[in-house]
Amino acid sequence: MTRLPAGGLIDRGKPIAFRFNGRTLTGFSGDTLASALIAHDVKIVGRSFKYHRARGILTDGIDEPNALVTLGSGARAEPNCRAPSVELFDGLEAYSQNCWPSPNFDLMAINGLLSRIFVAGFYYKTFMWPAALWEKLYEPLIRRAAGLGRLSGDPDPDTYDRSHAFTDLLVVGSGPAGLSAALCAARGGLRVLLIENDSRVGGRLLSQRYKVDGELGTAWADAALKELVANERVTILTRTSLFGAYDDKSFAAVERVSDHLPGAAIGRPRQRYWKIVAAQAIFATGATERPIAFGGNDRPGVMMASAIQTYINRYAVAPGKRAAIFTVCDTGYEVAADLAAAGVDVAAVIDARRQPGRSLAFAPAISGEIVRTFGKSLTAIEVRRYDGGVERIAVDLLGMAGGWNPNIGFASHLGNRPDWNESLQAFRQEKLSDGMMFAGAADGALTLTDALASGEAAAARVMSPASSMPPIGTSAQASPHVVRAIGQKVFVDFQHDVTVEDILLADREGYRSVEHLKRYTTLGMATDQGKAGQVLGHAVLAQHRGVEMAAVGTIAARPPHTPVAIGALAGMHRGEHLKPVRLTPTHCWAAENGASFVNAGLWKRAQWFTRAGDADWLASAVREAKAVRSAVGICDVSTLGKIEVEGPDAALLLDRLYANMMSTLPVGKCRYGLMLREDGFVFDDGTVARLDESRYVITTTTVNAVAVMRHVDFALQVIWPDLRAHACSVTESWAQIAVAGPQSRALLQDLLPDIDLSNETFPFMGAVAGTWDGIPMRLFRLSFSGELAYEIAVPTNHGDALVRTLARLGQTYGCTPYGLEALGILRIEKGHVAGGDLNGQVTAHDLGLGRMLSRKKDFIGRAMAERPMLVDPGRQALVGLKPVDPTQRLSAGSHLFRSGAAHVAGESQGHVTSVAYSGVFDQWIALGVLAHGPQRIGEVIVAASPMRGTRIEVEVCNPVFFDAAGERLRA
Amino acid sequence: MPDRRPSAFDPMLEDLGAIDLVGVQVAAWPAARTVVTMAYRGEEGTVAEVLGRFARNTPAVTMLQIGPGTWLSLCDGAFPDLGDAAATFDQGDGFAFLKLDGPAAMTVLQKGIFVDLEATLASVGACVCSVIGYINVIAWRASPNTIAVAVPRSFAGSFWHWLRTAAAAEGVPIGR
Amino acid sequence: MIISCPHCGPRDSSEFYFRGEATPTRPEYDAGTAAATGYVYGRINPAGPQKEHWYHAAACRSWLLVERDTRTHKFLSVTLASEQGR
C-alpha cells in the first residue's frame, strides 16, 4: 500500500469496498478508482489498443488515455470509463479492457511483435487481396479485433431526465478562475449557472498546496462555494460535464445524478441532459499538461507530473517509492517539491531546457534528456546529460512535465480555429464567437494569481463590455519537447498507440497536413479525442518538417467533448413514449369492446374489434364490413383534420385552394374536395361543408391534417394576405362518428327524434347543425363506405357518451363497431382513394378525377396540372384488380406486368396500391395504378412481388367494384 | 361560476392524493367556453380594444394573445360581438387545462420548455405558446402562485406522463 | 439554432417548419406555364443572404419571411410574411 499516512481530501473514516478484475480492494470516500488502485500499488491497469502494451494510469482526469475500464456488469456494464474520473462507491465493480486473461498477462500482446506491420495506415495497405475474402474473412476478423470495450447488448435499464436552463452567465469550470468569475458575476446580480465536472468545486486548487489570500486554496474554494450557494440567483451543478457548444449561445451538458451512488438508486434518474441557453459564457476550463516524447514513455509508472501532484495532495497516495521528474517548465519542480514533502524519495529532476542548472535541496537537478526506460513496469530510466555522459537511474515513478495546453476545444465547436501563441508556446483562442470567452489557464493565465485576476476580469467584462482583460504574464516557455528515439517506441497518442514513427511515416507518404495526419494515423481519434497527446503530435510534425507550429496548426475539436450515453439524449422519449400518443374521444369505449389499436401518425386508432368467434383479425374486419353493408356500423373518425374557415372571403379562399368549385356550394350542403400542390399533383382530399354564408368546415385526411392547416395558413398569410378570411383547426374540438349502413337512418332517427332525416328533407351530402340532448351537434350525410351513411359530431368530451348511446340504441339494428381495416375494405370496394393511393405521385387525372378540375377559376396547382406529361393517357392511372383465381391473395406493392413480360424493373407498368378481402365478392380485390389503365379494362395481367416470390394473374377492372351507380348512397 | 365541464385530465386527477405546498398542486381549469378570435387585416387594434375591455369588465375571463391579431379567450358564455372586424372560432373541448399551484410549478415547467420562463411568465396575465415533450402547450401566469397550462385535448395523457416524470426526477411531489 | 419570431421572441428552431426559398409572387393562371414553372421550381440558391419562408408551427402559426446567410447560418432579418405587401 502506498497510502500516505496523513493528508488528502479523502474521508478516512468512511472506508469503501470495491472490486477490480474480481479482486476485492478498499479505498476511502473521496477516492477515485484510480487513486484507490494506486493505493494498492496496481501498476498495470490495462493493455493498449493496437499493440497490447502494458499500461498504467497516466493522468488524474478526463484526459486519461490508458486506464479505461468497464464499470458494472449485466445491462448496466459501461465500457471505456476513465479510472481517474470514476468516483469510488461501495460495491463498485470494474474490469480492465482489451486484455485476456488479465492485464498483467495478456495473450494478445503478440500484436506487439507484429508492430512493424501494424504501423499507421496499415488498414489501407492490407486485407485487399483476394477481394472475395473481404466479406467472408477479413471483415469479420477486423470486427472482432476492433473496438475498445464492449457493450452489454441489453436494453439500458436506467431512466434519464432532461432539463432546460436559461442564464445570464454560464461559467464552465470551478477552479480559481471559474470561482472568481462566478463570485464577481453573482455579486453583480447576474443569474449564474456554474458547471463543474468534478464532484466538488476547486479545480487545480484541490491538487496543489497553494494559498489564496492567506488561506489554503481548498478552504478559499469552500468559502466561495458557500457564498455562491447562499445566492438564490446562482445554480451550481457538480458532476456535470459540458459536452458541446452550439449556435446561438446554446450549450449541452450531462449531469451524473446517481452514477456515484451505490446500487440502482430507485426513482432517481441516472443522468440528466441539460440544454442551456446563456447570454454569456466564460470557459474557465483550465489547461491540460502535455507529455514529452521520448523512448519508452508509455511504460506503467510514467505519469503526468501534475497528476502525481493530484494523487499526492488530494488523494494522499504515492504512485511510487522513488521518483524522477522530466520537465521543460517550472511546474515540474513544484511537483518534485510536493513529492519530497510527502516523504517520497526524489532521485532527480531532469530539465530538458538548455539553461543554467538549478540546485535543489531535496534532489539533484540534471540538465539533459531521458532517452529510454526499463522494466515491465518502470524500474529505471536512462538519462543523457547535456554536458556529456549517460546515466541509468533506478526509479519506479517518472513524472512528465511537458508544458500546458489551454483547454479551448469548445471554441472550435463553433468553427473558430485557435492560433499558436509563441510566447505561451501553446494554442490560444484569439477569435471568439459572440458571448463566449476563456478565462484562467484556458486563456493562457497559467499562474494562480493570473488565473484569479483573469476570472474576475472576464466576469467584469460580461457586466461592462468595455472593460479589458489583463495581459497574460509570460511564464517560462515550455515548448513541446521531442527526444530523438533510440531503439524504443516513442508514444504520442497513448490510446491509439500512435508513435513518432507513425507521424514521420505519414509525412513521408504525403499526409502532411494535420487533418490528413489525423485520419491516416488515427492520432486524436480515440475516446479521449487526443486531449493528452495530440498537440505534441502536431509539434512532432512541425519539427520534422522544419516549420513553425503556427503554420502546422491543430485540429478542430467537435462535440461531444467527452462520451455521452445515448440514453441521456433520449431522456423519457423511448419505447412507448418515443413520441406523444393521441387518443380519440372513444378510446376507452373501443378498448372495452375488444379493439386492437394501430398507430396513425401520433393517434391510436381502432383497427378492428375482436369478438368471440373471430378466427383472426381478417375475420373480424370482414365481419365488420359485412355488417355495415347489411345493417349498420359505427366508426370513430375524429382523427381526420377539421378546419373551420370563416369570413366574407371564405368562399373565395376555398375556390383557390380546391380544384373544384366551392363558392357554389349552398348553405347546408357538403361537397367532396380535391386539393392539389402547386406542382399539379394531388395533395389531399376531403369534404367541405357550408354551415352558413361565410362559415365552412373542411376535412382533411388524418395524416395530412397538420400539412393542410399549414398550407391554408400559407395561402392566407403569404399568397393572398388581403383576403378577409381566417382558418382555425377544430380537429380537437369535435368527436366525429361515422354511422354507416342501410339501417343508419333508422338508428340516427332514434338518436335525434326532433330532426327530419328523410331522404327528401336531408338528402345525400347535406349538412345541418342542431343539438343532441342539449349538446351542440353537427350532422353530415357523407359516405366513405358507399352505403347510406352519416357523420355525427359533438364536442369532444361528449364523444364517449355519444358512442355509448349509439351502441345501445343500435342493438335493435345489429349495430357493429368497425375499425380501420373494415373501413379499408369498404372504401376499396367502392374505389375511393385514400392513403396508399394518394402517394404524392398521382394526379387528379390518374385517379379518374380529371373532371373535377375547374376551368372557371384559378386554383393552386391548376397551371402545372395541365403540363402535357401530367395529362398523358400513357400515365399509370387508377384501376381495379381482381385475381383470376378467386382463391389467391394479392399483396400491396406488387408490380404489374403485361402477360408474358419479364418481371424486371424496366417492364413494370404500375403497382398495386391498396388491397382488401372483399366480403361482397368473397375474394381479394385491389386498387392499383397501371399505364393506360382505364383503356385496358378486361385485360389479364400479372401482379408480381419479387420480394415475396408471388406471381398472380389479375383482371383489370373498374375500380368501383360495387354499386357503380351509387344507388345505396342516395337511398 | 358555472359547472365545470368534464376535462380530459379528470381520470388522472382522481388518482391523486392531497399534498402540501412543497410540491405542485394540480387541478382542472373551470372555463366554460373557449374561443379563438382572429382579427381581419387592419382591424387588430379595434379587436384588441374590444377584447381588452371585455376581459377587464367581465369576471372570470382570461384573455391570452397567442399570435399576431389572435386571441384565446376563456370565459363563461357571453362573448362580445366583433362584427366585421374578426373571425371567431369556438374551440369547445379542444383544449385540456391544468392549474399548477406552488413555487415548484415554475421549476418543473421550465425543465420541459425551451423558453426562459423567468423572463416570459413574470407578471400575472403573461402567456407563452411553445412545446413540451413534443406537445404544443400554452402556459400563462394565472396568479402570483399559479401557472395554468393548456394542451390539445388528445395529448392530455402524454402531457400528464411528462409532468409526472419531470417532477419525480426532481423529487417534487404532485398532488391535489 | 434559435430564431427570433417577431411575435414570440427567440425560439428553438424545432418550433418551426422550413418551407424553402421564398418564391416570387405567385403568377396568375393566365401568365402561362413558363411563369408557373419558374414559380414552382425556379430557385436562386445563393451563397449568401437568401430569402426564406419559415412557419412558426408550434406557437403563433405565423408564416415568416426570413433573410438568412446560407454560408454562415446567420439570420439577418425575420418579419411577418403577411406584412410584406406582396
Image (cartoon, coloured by chain):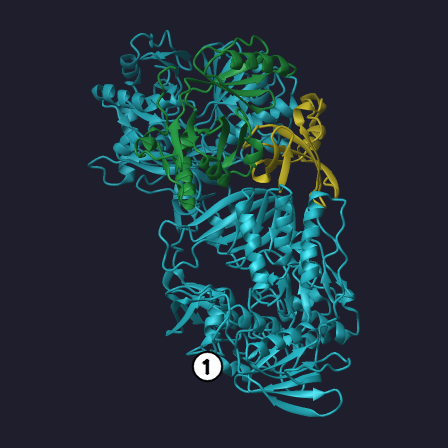
Viewed as shown, does residue A422 lie left or right of B60?
right
Q: Is residue A280 above or below residue A86?
A: above
- Depth check: give the residue in front, A13 or A558: A13
Label 1 marks a residue whose chain is A
Q: Is residue A475 left or right of residue A812?
A: right
Task: Tell me the quarter of the picture where residue A634 sits.
Answer: top left
Residue occupying image coordinates x 61% and y 18%:
A855
At a point 48% along the width and 32% down the height, the residue shown is: A878
Q: What color was chain A assigned in the picture?
A: cyan
Name the element at disc 1.
loop
Relative placement, left or right, of A585 versus A709 is left
Percent from the top left, x then y, of residue A496? Answer: 58, 71
Front residue of A100 and A956: A100
Provide residue A170's location: percent of width, then percent of height. 61, 48
Residue A702 position within the rendered picture, expressed as x and y whole percent measured from the top left? 45, 31
Q: Which chain is yellow?
A: C
Residue A905's place in the image compared with A339, above or below, is above
The residue under label 1 is which amino acid type? Asn
Q: Nearer the viewer, residue B82 or A816?
A: B82
Nearest to the observer: residue A251 or residue A668: A251
Q: According to the image, label 1 marks what residue? A: A104
Coordinates of residue A836 in the picture (x, y in percent): 45, 36
Q: Colour of chain B?
A: green
